[in-house]
Structures are given as structure tokens and as C-alpha cells.
Amino acid sequence: MTGHGDDRDRVSYAPAPLDRDATFYVAGHRGLVGSAIWRRLESAGFGRLLGRSSAELDLTDRDAVLDLFREHRPRYVVVAAAKVGGILANATYPVDFLSENLRIQVNVLDAARAYEVERLLFLGSSCIYPRLAPQPIVEESLLTGHLEPTNDAYAIAKIAGILQVQAVRRQDGLPWISAMPTNLYGPGDNFSPAGSHVLPALIRRYDEAAASRAPSVTNWGTGSPRREFLHSDDMADACLHLLEHYDGPTHVNVGTGTDVTIQEVAATIAGVVGYEGETLWDRTKPDGTPQKLLDVARLRSTGWTASIGLEEGLASTVEWYRSSTRTGSRTAASHVGA
């Protein structure tokens, strides 16, 4: 399903610049990725952007989603809406992550199919790959081994979304594509203690420790796992690039092509926030996947590479976090918004 079914693909489409005057629906436009995509589309001149907050539209409500598409008939769609969370949230609420994400995806993709959306980009996650996939991970590694147990339910939902996109291409001939981002961060991230991913969790922890002058900070695991981090603004730029430069049944990895250990990123964050205390590691807590580095050769072959360095991106994210903390607008949402 990762490219072996090319002979069944019915799409005949030559990627080209999208119509800036067409209606463009961003599902999940208030989340980390969706808000960055919205900003990127605005800067690119798209004048008819469509978005709904979770208070305005529940994407698990099938009839409501169909009504939105019936009323606005978007020509382009990016599916950035999802229920997301870190290791603890995924391990504690696997039913929620599986059920909600499946319903969101099926509703949006079915509605897009019913109203023949011309161009659609479905966003997944690098956790779709086997826990012990050879590094760096190529797109063809999908479904070749066991998933990471701490987020397998979320991964299965995202895998189902990839297959639905491929099935639409085979059955209906619509030029829909999928992209699999690596670990993302940036303005608008979820910094809540219980639901955040590793990088925003570390930013919050070290910033609070710096403010209180705590003698030490304790992080989960050993700090040895290696992770790849991509700024959300780079991800948004890659999304528009793929919509205008790539078509094919195979999903595309989106990342930087380089990784760091959790210990290294923790030290970088400590330096950015000005924390000078000691870092301790709680080895009774899980590490998660030992390494997760994406092979981005397919993406680079289309002419795109990341441009925001990790230290630069962390500095701007810390600045946004501190500003949002002062104004009381820091997000604690699960990014299920429409």
C-alpha cells in the first residue's frame, strides 16, 4: 500500500500552482499544524480560506461535516485535524485516540469525496512506522513490523487515513495525497502537563524551573532516544509545496533528515530559557521508540528542504510560550478543532 499499488492508481494529474481564488478548507485550523498552514496560505495569497473551530463544528458529527461541504464546496482541503497527545495521553486513552481520529478522518474524507474535492492533503504522523524500522525510515517501511505500543491506537487511525486516500485515488481518480510529518513544534503547540508532546513538555518544565530557580529538573526515561524535530512553519511550507509539486499514491515523509537525542534537545532548551540547574532522568518511565528519523529523499526530490534550524525554532517557540503565558492564551487543547 505504500507504492506497490501504483499500477492500480487511476489518477492523471499534473501538479501546478493552486488557484488562489478557490475555496480552501483547512480542517483543524486552530491547532499547531493547521494554524501554521493557515498563515502560510494567507501569505501565499489565498483569499477564500475556510475554517471552523471545534466550538463551531464537531468533526465527529458526520451530518454537520457533510453540511459544511454542501454549503461551501471547497476545491482544496488539508486534513490537519486530529486528537493528539504525548506518550502518557496515548497510553492512557487509546480508545479515545483510535475512535475520535477514525471518525474525524472518515467524516472529512467522505464529505470531500461526496463533493469531489479536487486536491486534498491528509496529514498523518511518523508514529505510523514500525517501532524498530530501519533508520532513516523510508515510506516503504509502513506495515512491515510491530508498532510502538505506547501510541499504536493513534498510529492505526492514521494508517487507515493513508489507505482511504489511496483507495479514493484507485476508485475515483481524485488526486489526493498524504504527508507524514516528523515531530512538530512551534507557536500554538499544546503545553498542558498531561497532554503535550516531548518538546513543549520540556519547554514548560525548564521555563518553570528557571523562573523558580529550582535546583534540578527531572525528565522521563534515559534521554537516549533520538528524535527529529520540524518547526510547524516549515511543515506548513512543505504542505503547500507538495500540493503544487507532488502527486502519487505513496505518502511523503516530511522532516529535516537529521535527529538529536532527547538529552541534547533538553540541554538546548535549558540554554534557551536560561536554566542553569541539574537535569535528572527517571529511568522508571518509558523512553518510547529508540529512534525515529525519517528518510526525506522523496520530499527533497520535489525541491523542498527545511529552513528553520532547531535552536532558532526553539527560541521563537519559547518566546511565543512566554508571551501566551502572560496573556493567559496558552493552548491546552487536544487539536480536535475543525
Image: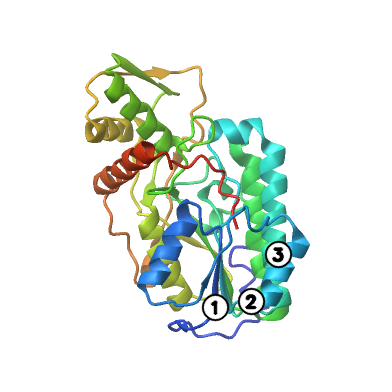
* Residue 51, picture quadrant: bottom right
Q: Is residue 142 left or right of residue 31?
A: right
**Residue 153 percent coordinates (x, y):** 67, 42
* Front one among 153 and 338: 338
Question: Residue extending furthest top?
Answer: 215
Rendered position, 33 above or below 225: below
Q: Quadrant of the C terminus?
A: bottom right
**Residue 112 percent coordinates (x, y):** 67, 72
Rendered position, 219 above or below 203: above
> Residue placed at 42% from the left, 55% from the top?
295
Amino acid on which disc 3 is placed:
Val
* Residue 142, picture quadrant: bottom right
Q: Secondary structure at mark 1?
A: loop
The residue to which callout 3 is attached is 65
Amino acid on which disc 1 is placed:
Thr
**Residue 246 percent coordinates (x, y):** 47, 75
Of labels 1 and 3, earlier in sequence is 1
Q: How is the image coloured?
A: rainbow
Q: Are marks 1 and 2 in contact (CB under 8 Å)?
A: yes
**Residue 218 percent coordinates (x, y):** 39, 19
Q: Quadrant of the N terminus?
A: bottom right
The residue to which callout 1 is attached is 23
Q: CA distance from mark 1 to mark 2?
A: 8 Å
> Residue placed at 45% from the left, 71% from the top?
242
The residue to which callout 2 is attached is 72
Q: Is residue 149 left or right of residue 224?
A: right
Of labels 2 and 3, earlier in sequence is 3
Amino acid on which disc 2 is placed:
His
> Residue placed at 71% from the left, 61% from the top?
106
Of labels 1 and 2, earlier in sequence is 1
Mark 3 neighbour density, 10 Å: few (under 14) some (14–19) many (20 or more): many
